[in-house]
Each structure stands twice: as structure tokens, then as C-alpha cells.
Image (cartoon, rainbow, N blue to C red):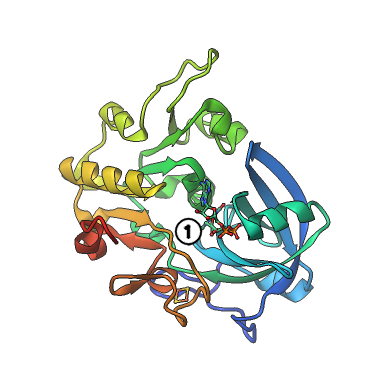
Amino acid sequence: MIAHVDVDGRPEPICGMDQWMPAPARILAVQTENFNTRTFRLQFVDPVLREQFRFAPGQFNMLYAPGVGEAAISISSDPARPGVIDHTIRVVGSVTRAVDAAGPGGLVGLRGPFGKPWPMKQMEGHNLVIVAGGIGLAPLRPVIYSILNERDRYRRVVLLYGCRTPEDRLYAHELEQWEDRGAIQVLVTVDNATAAWTGPVGVVTNLLKRLRVSAQETIVLVCGPKILNRVAAWKFLQLHVPPSRVYVSLERNMNCGFGRCGHCQYDKFFVCRDGPVFCFADIADVFAKEEI
Ligand SMILES: Cc1cc2nc3c(=O)[nH]c(=O)nc-3n(C[C@H](O)[C@H](O)[C@H](O)COP(=O)(O)OP(=O)(O)OC[C@H]3O[C@@H](n4cnc5c(N)ncnc54)[C@H](O)[C@@H]3O)c2cc1C
Ligand code: FES
């Protein structure tokens, strides 16, 4: 349980921990999600850190591959299960390749958690529509765990998830479990179907046609590629969901992770400190500019 949080729901930093200094963490297990994405289960080597580390859904760590560098990676595990930290990683470049090569038993470094989380407190008592594209489901998985842990705090919950092919789905087994438990409605669409696929085909925003929720009582969470964030946010506004109830998680190249270097500047914001989760009402004018 998170003992102390700030107004945004962020856990207080661990007393005495240096935010610049990655702490060693061991890779306990690796789960392959698809051809280039794996979920790494990590555990701090230091038992005190292991015990004290807390995060809120939507926060990220700076993950360090020794001798190579760091990358911002969202935490994808259950916040109510301290002791281990999951990171779902698409292996695309030098850091992610080095972490992948380390494999089970390997050592990496972690510093965090950083960033503004999803508005879990505000979401209570509302219908929730969660829209994810591709790897964008990773920072939303802790939201889903938190909802399932305290299901009666929320009203209707719908997950709309889009990916390229059925084989690209993250957490395929869990998607089925979430749906089977009846606690949340899961709608998955793919860009390219295989012969065995019987579900919808097309972009994730097409699934909005199937939605029957009252706009005024709904909070929307979106995380995916830039184009999905943009289109989904606008579509919900057209459905009369107020901008104050639409939240989007953004990505920017990061360096420090906590508002010191300016690397992740997004107009007047630093994505690491003021995001990655933004309320649409706060960023509507910046979001409208294609070039930013
Ligand atoms: C707040 C935040 C949270 C993030 N969470 C996650 C997460 O949970 N999981 C995750 O995997 N990543 C996540 N990222 C993205 C991750 O930080 C970057 O992908 C990072 O650049 C990887 O570092 P690297 O050193 O491996 O790659 P780099 O050496 O930085 O190289 C990345 C290269 O890959 C290219 N590239 C990027 N994406 C793709 C792609 N889809 N296909 C092909 N090429 C690509 C880039 O153009 C670049 O040239 C997050 C980023 C932010 C800001
Ligand atoms: S990464 Fe340094 S200010 Fe955001």
C-alpha cells in the first residue's frame, strides 16, 4: 500500500535515495510478449529498497544497462504487489537490446519512480474507457490491476486495445482473463487479421462506435502512438466528454527523468515532471500543433 502520496497521487520518494544514481536490480524472469517485446520482472538487490519502493499507475523508471545508457520505461506491474517490478520493453535500440541480452539473472540499474500518474482517485465512481495502442498497454496495466483489486470503486470499465496483428497483443493471456472475469469489457482490434482471428479488424478508434457509455460520467485514458493519442482524444471530445476528463500519456526522449535537464520539453511542460500523464484540458493548445 502507498503510505504517503502527493496531490497527484505520486508516492513520496524513498528517504535518502539519490534520484541520479541507478540502484542495482536483478532480472528475475523474462516473459516473451511478441516478436520484439518482453516483460522483465526485476527486483532491487538492496532489501531495503525492495521493501520501500512504491509507485502509482502510469509512472516510469529510468532503466540503466551498465556501460550502455538509460531509457525511460513505464512500470507495468501491480502497484499492490511490492517487491518486484515489471517492465514491458520493446527491444528497439542500444539500451533495450543490452537489457534483453542480460536475460534472467542479469543485473541492470533502476532509478525512479518518476512522473505524474493516472488520476486514480478522480476515476473512482466513474465509467472508465481505457484506450491503448501497441506497447501503450504497458503503462495502463497497473491501472487495470488497481481497478480489479478494488472493483467496486469504479463503474463500468471498458478497455479498447489495438495492435498490428493478433500475435502482437501484449498480455494475451491476461486480456482473456480480464474479460472472462466479467469485471471489465475488453475489445481488441487488429490492423491485419490472421485466418484464426474472429475479432474486429481496423484502427482502435473504430471501436468507439460500439461504446454505449454516458459521456458526462466517463473518464477516458489514452496511451499509444502519437496519431492514436491525437485521434482518440479528439473523438472523445466530439462525443462530448469534457477535456477535463480525457487523459493522455505522452512520450519524449528523456535524460534526467525528474525535471532537471530540459531534454523532454513539450512547449511549456517537461514530460518527465508534468507528465507523462496529462489532462487534455491542460495541453489542448499544444496538442493542436502538429509540429510539437
Ligand atoms: C515516459 C516514457 C515511458 C516509456 N515506456 C516504455 C515502455 O514501457 N516500454 C518501452 O519499450 N518503451 C518505453 N518508452 C520508450 C523508450 O524509452 C524508448 O524506446 C527508448 O528510446 C529505448 O531506448 P534504446 O536505447 O533501446 O533505444 P535508442 O538507442 O534510444 O533507439 C531507439 C531507436 O529506435 C527507433 N525506434 C523507436 N521506436 C521504434 C519502433 N517502434 N520500431 C522501430 N524503431 C523504433 C528510434 O527511432 C530510435 O532510432 C517510454 C518512453 C517514455 C518517455
Ligand atoms: S528528462 Fe530531464 S527535464 Fe525531463
Residue 53 lies in quadrant: bottom right
**Could you say where residue 183 lies in the image, as x and y percent from the top left?**
47, 35
Q: Which of the image's four quarters has the C terminus?
A: bottom left
Measured from the top left, where is residue 242 in percent x and y? Answer: 19, 52
Q: Nearer the viewer, residue 173 or 31?
A: 31
Q: Tell whether 131 sits left or right of 80.
A: left
Q: How busy is the neighbourhood of tag 1: few (under 14 within 10 Å), some, or many (20 plus)?
A: many
Q: Residue at x 42, y 70 (%)?
A: 264
Image position, residue 257 (x, y; %): 51, 73
In the rendered structure, the answer to whether residue 13 lies left or right of residue 40 reads: left
Residue sitting at 44 percent across and 70 percent down? Answer: 272
Q: Residue at x 59, y 38 (%)?
A: 171
Residue at 78%, 52% in the rendered image: 103
Q: Residue furthest right?
A: 105
Residue 1 seen from this side: no
Quadrant housing residue 290:
bottom left
Q: Position of residue 246 (x, y in %)?
A: 28, 52
| Vertical order, 107 against 37 (above or below) | below
Residue at the far top: name it: 195
Residue denoted by label 1: 58
- In this rendering, is residue 71 above or below 229? below
The amino acid on which the numbered mark 1 sits, given as a three-letter code, is Gly
The secondary element bearing badge 1 is classed as: loop
230 vs 221, nearest the viewer = 230
